[in-house]
Image: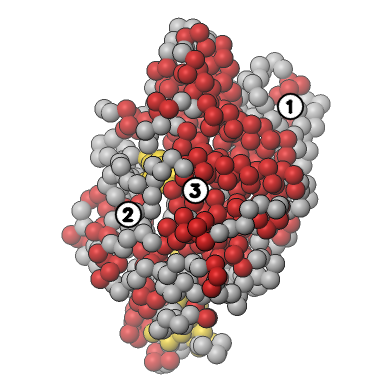
């Protein structure tokens, strides 16, 4: 078994021992007294082995088996892009829950405890403790390591602590900060109240700064272990999130500028290495049997039969059902002349049939969805992004489909960190610094290095056969203003945000993006009615199966003038228009201010009270 496959397939007994134990809801597992000694922390192999368990949680990829925690397509489905049919849309929490904690250890958490409506952690500090143990033992047993190895493994420990705290901050905001393992008899420290968000983020900043500067070069050629470029890529993501959160939520301008500058610096560590490029087609990132050597992949998760497989490709195979994306997302895709559809000169720019969108829009639309209305999606827009072109081709010949494209037997590798995200983080941070904090203005060279490099990816043969063209580059001097742009968002920043939306459909970014921009109102179905519609469909020609008795009275289309037509069993020829997603109803009205952060459960607060301590509730709750 190669180390690469070992990394995500199984864990050593020693690692499991370090994370077994306590059922306290803060989940600070006890150490195993036999293993936790100089007899364990002997050399780099031991430190690497201890770190193995972090990987499938923080670099989940496509998870494993039928797991969906932190996965694209199946995990990240709560945002303004995605609409569930046949149901009321998921509501934002409106009351304080009984509990938001988990009593699981990190080993047990791998089975799936996460806050799906927040894209972050439960109230659980097991990963923080595990990272603190690694940091503590690296210092304690530094004599067993070379100076370079000591710095590197300290960097790895501090990196994972930063990442663990980031996942808590995006969910809860203020959280108690611990920089060392806490003895379970030390109740005063264990049950201290939450520290301010800014204080915690400054500690994350410090950890990531140290980690980038001290990750030694011997590991920097690997795409299977944490190295300088992995750390810098994650730092780029975290610092962009918090830099823009601080700005748009009116917190600290000083911290906002500091974090955005670090986002820019961390991104440039990756960019200036010249190790990565957007020189392979978009679909190759998600459906390839192997991502080894892929020029855009900074870190990937490897899958192989009989070792570890997943099910995410199966949910892209054309047979499995999906909650589909909506018309609001389709309208955000630019045409291939680089302009929004309302001001585009491309032929059929206002034609929202899937077949025409594939030809008129940015090439990522065709690479993300089937170019026809497909009934296995509740919105009739079916995502086939996370499977190979071959795997997606069996949608109407299931009996001939190879086993690797079904069930939980998928073997395609998962791109965990990719260069396009770093580029888009970088250009957004640069634009925000220029807009608000006196940073250098964004130049055409900056746009060419980032947005235009992404748009210039080569097209694969299937895309060319489907009539797809590359999107024209973004030219600052001739940038066209989008009539639908929010008035409070500058034109360039609006286009950078659009680029993220097209690039990361069904991936980890969208909910966190609209939260950091303070745009959670985008999920208000009443305010944005296109979130309840699908593409333009001629049902008699494209989806005749819907013209049946079962759909009478609940199949509705919206004409170009806004008129709604309901299928009555005899008017099939009139069922041409934007598909009103069947039986989908809007989510309840929600308090925008409360939607950004999770409350603490009443049980957690009571547990503190019972011991004479105070746990402060999330502001606004």
Q: Position of residue 575 (x, y in %)?
A: 43, 87
Quarter assignment of residue 397: bottom left
- Say what secondary structure mark 3 lies in: helix
Instruction: Of the two numbered discs 2 and 1 on the same chain, state the one appearing first in sequence.
Output: 1
* Nearer the observer, 164 or 65: 164
Q: Residue at x 55, y 45 (%)?
A: 237
Pointer 1 local density, CA inside 10 Å: few below 14, some 14–19, many at least 20: some
Pointer 3 local density, CA inside 10 Å: few below 14, some 14–19, many at least 20: many
Question: As drawn, which residue projects farthest toward the left?
Answer: 400
Q: Residue at x 32, y 32 (%)?
A: 4
Q: Is residue 208 above or below residue 619?
A: above
Image disc number at residue 191: 1
From mark 3 to mark 1, how far is it between C-alphas? 38 Å
Q: Nearer the viewer, mark 2 or mark 1?
A: 2
Q: Residue at x 62, y 72 (%)?
A: 485
* Nearer the observer, 251 or 562: 251
Q: Position of residue 190 (x, y in %)?
A: 71, 24
Image disc number at residue 280: 2
- Say what secondary structure mark 1 lies in: loop
Instruction: Of the two numbered discs 3 and 1 on the same chain, state the one appearing first in sequence.
Output: 1
Q: Position of residue 393 (x, y in %)?
A: 25, 63
Q: Is residue 447 above or below residue 123?
A: below
Which residue matches tag 3?
A: 422
- Say what secondary structure mark 2 lies in: loop
Q: Is residue 342 above or below residue 60?
A: below
Asked if residue 78 shows in the view, the reply is: no
Q: Is residue 158 above or below residue 388?
A: above
* Nearer the observer, 530 or 34: 530
Q: Residue at x 48, y 80 (%)?
A: 344
């Amino acid at each position: 078994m190669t180390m690469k496959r070992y990394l995500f397939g199984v864990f050593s007994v020693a690692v499991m021992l370090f994370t077994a134990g306590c059922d306290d809801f803060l989940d600070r597992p006890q150490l195993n007294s036999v293993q936790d000694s100089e007899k364990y922390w002997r050399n780099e192999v031991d430190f690497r082995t201890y770190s193995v368990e972090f990987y499938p949680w923080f670099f989940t990829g496509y998870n494993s088996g039928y797991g969906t925690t932190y996965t694209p397509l199946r995990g990240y489905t709560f945002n303004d892009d995605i609409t569930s049919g046949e149901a009321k849309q998921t509501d934002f929490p409106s009351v304080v829950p009984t509990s938001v904690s988990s009593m699981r250890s990190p080993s047990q958490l791998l089975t799936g405890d996460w806050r799906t409506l927040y894209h972050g952690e439960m109230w659980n500090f097991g990963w923080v403790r595990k990272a603190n143990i690694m940091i503590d033992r690296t210092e304690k047993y530094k004599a067993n390591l070379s100076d370079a190895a000591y710095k590197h493994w300290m960097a790895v420990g501090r990196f994972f602590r930063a990442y663990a705290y980031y996942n808590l901050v995006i969910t809860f905001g203020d959280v108690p900060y611990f920089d060392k393992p806490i003895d379970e008899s030390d109740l005063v420290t264990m049950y201290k109240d939450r520290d301010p968000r800014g204080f915690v983020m400054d500690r994350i900043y410090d950890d990531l700064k140290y980690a980038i500067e001290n990750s030694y070069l011997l590991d920097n050629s690997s795409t299977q272990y944490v190295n300088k470029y992995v750390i810098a890529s994650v730092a780029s993501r975290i610092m962009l999130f918090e830099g823009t959160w601080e700005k748009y939520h009116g917190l600290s301008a000083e911290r906002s500028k500091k974090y955005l500058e670090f986002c820019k610096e961390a991104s440039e560590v990756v960019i200036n290495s010249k190790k990565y490029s957007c020189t392979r087609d978009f679909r190759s990132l998600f459906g390839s049997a192997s991502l080894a050597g892929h020029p855009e992949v900074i870190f990937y998760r490897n899958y192989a039969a009989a070792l570890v497989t997943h099910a995410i490709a199966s949910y892209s195979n054309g047979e499995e059902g999906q909650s589909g994306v909506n018309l609001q997302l389709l309208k955000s895709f630019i045409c291939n002349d680089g302009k929004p559809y309302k001001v585009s000169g491309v032929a059929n720019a206002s034609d929202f049939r899937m077949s025409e969108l594939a030809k008129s829009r940015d090439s990522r639309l065709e690479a993300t969805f089937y170019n026809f209305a497909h009934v296995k999606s509740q919105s009739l827009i079916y995502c086939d992004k996370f499977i190979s072109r071959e795997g997606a081709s069996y949608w109407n010949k299931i009996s001939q489909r190879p086993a690797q494209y079904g069930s939980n037997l998928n073997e395609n590798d998962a791109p965990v960190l990719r260069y396009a995200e770093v580029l888009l983080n970088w250009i957004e941070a640069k634009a925000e610094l220029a807009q608000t904090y006196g940073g250098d203005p964004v130049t055409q060279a900056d746009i060419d290095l980032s947005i235009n490099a992404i748009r210039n990816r080569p097209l694969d043969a299937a895309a060319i056969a489907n009539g797809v063209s590359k999107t024209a580059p973004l030219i600052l001097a001739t940038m066209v203003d989008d009539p639908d742009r929010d008035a409070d968002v500058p034109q360039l920043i609006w286009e950078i945000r659009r680029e993220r939306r097209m690039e990361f459909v069904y991936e980890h970014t969208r909910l966190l993006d609209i939260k950091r921009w303070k745009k959670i109102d985008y999920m208000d179905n009443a305010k944005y009615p296109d979130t309840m519609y699908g593409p333009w469909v001629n049902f008699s020609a494209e989806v005749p199966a819907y013209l049946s008795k079962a759909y009478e009275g609940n199949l509705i289309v919206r004409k170009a003038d806004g008129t709604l037509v309901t299928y009555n069993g005899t008017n099939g020829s009139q069922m041409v228009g934007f598909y009103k997603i069947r039986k989908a109803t809007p989510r309840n009205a929600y308090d925008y201010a409360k939607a950004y952060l999770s409350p603490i459960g009443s049980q957690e607060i009571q547990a503190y009270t019972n011991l004479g301590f105070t746990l402060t509730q999330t502001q606004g709750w």
